Image (tube, rainbow, N blue to C red):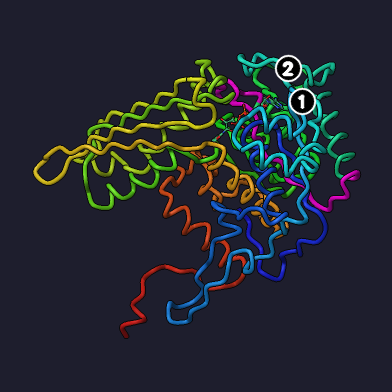
Amino acid sequence: MAVAKQSEIAPAEGRLGVLLVGLGAVSTTFIAGVEAIKKGFAQPIGSLTQMGTIRLGKRTENRVPLIKDFVPLAQLKDMVFGAWDIFPDSAYDAALNAGVLEKELLGQLKVPLRKIKPMKAVFDQTYVKRLSGTNVKTGKNKFELAQQLIDEIAEWKRKNKCSRLVMIWAASTEIFLKPHAVHKTLDSFEQAMRDNHKAIAPSMIYAYAALKSGIPFANGAPNLTVDIPALMSLADKNKLAICGKDFKTGQTLMKTIIAPGLKSRMLGLHGWYSTNILGNRDGEVLDDPDSFKTKEESKLSVLEYILQPEVYPALYKDFSHVVRINYYPPRGDNKEGWDNIDIFGWLGYPMQIKIDFLCRDSILAAPIVLDLALFLDLAQRAGMKGVQEWLSFYFKSPQTAPGLYPEHDIFIQLMKLKNTLRHLRGEDLITHLGLEYYD
Ligand SMILES: NC(=O)c1ccc[n+]([C@@H]2O[C@H](COP(=O)([O-])OP(=O)(O)OC[C@H]3O[C@@H](n4cnc5c(N)ncnc54)[C@H](O)[C@@H]3O)[C@@H](O)[C@H]2O)c1
């Protein structure tokens, strides 16, 4: 990850276009939230870029600016939104349909939300079995579909008078795909698109179109998407920031908060059983075993990396980790996640922790989308290219350089994020050593 100095961060001038793939629960909750905040109806709760502060220098210096005052982020008033979806509903109708936000609030936001009509999607039911829609592009092959996206993006940018764009995948989870030989180089990837190869999923076509158009890309779902050598090298070549995968919300957020705490006290783990009931469209898509497999892989890896059984065999060898998601329509977007955690302490005595998280998935995801849009745009203006590991904080399955294991501990992730911002602005990194106070 190449990093530039403070003086090299270009100012956030003009409008920032946020292109969302998928105009479902997460995207509409995000857009409606930003519009509500712009109108002064709401506060940006859950957003680090808007509400978070950053300590600078020694604790005795009392320098604690807001992050948005410390680094030159785009302002919410300068953000505009575009989207693709397989359903033609406007953001207003899609938000009503998602059922996350109250009708009364949406009614107050009708004007801006109605204006957002989704562009025709690049979609193939092979990759999301539970969905079918009509608002879909047609083309000779996957390469031609990518060219259509590239032209459409250029036209959208011009029409919306944007100076910069970012693209975020907030569309349904695709089926589990393993890295394939055609993903290795840009040439083999482009040839595979021309050949309509099965290993090229729609999400990869969007990511390719973004990177070809000079736009940074974030992946909010667990699909492989931009986490393949061909697209990583394209990002490098075109000096573009990329990050992923899978927004860290709900149960995994809790896991990455609690597991580091248990480990810090050297408490052992026999098992962690997690189950969810979820009734939104995401839950319906994840009811398909192939889409669930993609999600499961993303959710399972977290504990292994945090607890490091190979370093602490007496505490974490062979713990059992089970994750389930059950589609249960009555709950809509209001997921309920249960965790049963079997731990052990001094002399091996067992204890249990039970968590019942009555969470709202899209309410947790929306501020992540906002922060990612703003930080990706910042990274781009700061000349940071390739995988943005400092944005791991936002992901269940953080994308890293090949061969490097991901950091899942949310507290380390936050420290990494803030130190990256300090580094960008030429401030001292904070190590928490603190000996200087006692000299
Ligand atoms: N807290 C969260 O909600 C959360 C957390 C982590 C990850 N995610 C992921 O974010 C994504 C969005 O979640 P959601 O709750 O908004 O789901 P959703 O089903 O409400 O919305 C997804 C939308 O994507 C559309 N879509 C599917 N394939 C498409 C394509 N190829 N092109 C354009 N549009 C397409 C669907 O029609 C749908 O409207 C899912 O993949 C989900 O797994 C969500």
| Residue at the spot 80% in from the left edge and 26% down from the top edge | 120
The residue at 52%/61% (across/down) is: 418
Question: Is 162 contained in the magenta span?
Answer: yes
Q: Is residue 267 left or right of residue 25?
A: left
Amino acid of disc 2: Gly
Q: Position of residue 45 (x, y in %)?
A: 56, 53
Among the 4 quarters of the image, the one containing residue 226: top right
Q: Secondary structure at mark 1?
A: loop
Of residues 320 and 337, the one drawn nearer to the viewer in this rendering: 337
Residue at mark 1: C-beta within 8 A of ligand 1? yes
Of badges 1 and 2, the one in the foreground is 2
Q: Is residue 65 left or right of residue 352?
A: right
393 is higher (above) or lower (below) than 251: below
Nearer-N-terminus badge (1/2): 1
Return the mark for residue 133. Answer: 2
Which class describes the residues within 10 Å of circle 2: few (<14), some (14-19), or many (20+)? few
Q: Please check the rendered image and state whether residue 112 is part of the magenta-colored stretch, yes or no.
A: no
* CA distance for labels 1 and 2: 9 Å
Specify the segment rendered in magenta. 158-182
Q: Nearer the viewer, residue 407 or 30?
A: 30
Does the image show residue 211? no
Quadrant of residue 96 in the image?
top right
Ligand 1 visible in quadrant: top right
Check disc 1 and give the amino acid type.
Ala
Q: Within the image, what quadrant is residue 307 found in?
A: top left
Q: Residue at x 76, y 63 (%)?
A: 10
Residue at mark 1: 121
Is the Cβ of the residue at disc 1 closer than 8 Å to that at disc 2?
yes
Q: Out of 196 and 421, give the one closest to the viewer.
A: 421
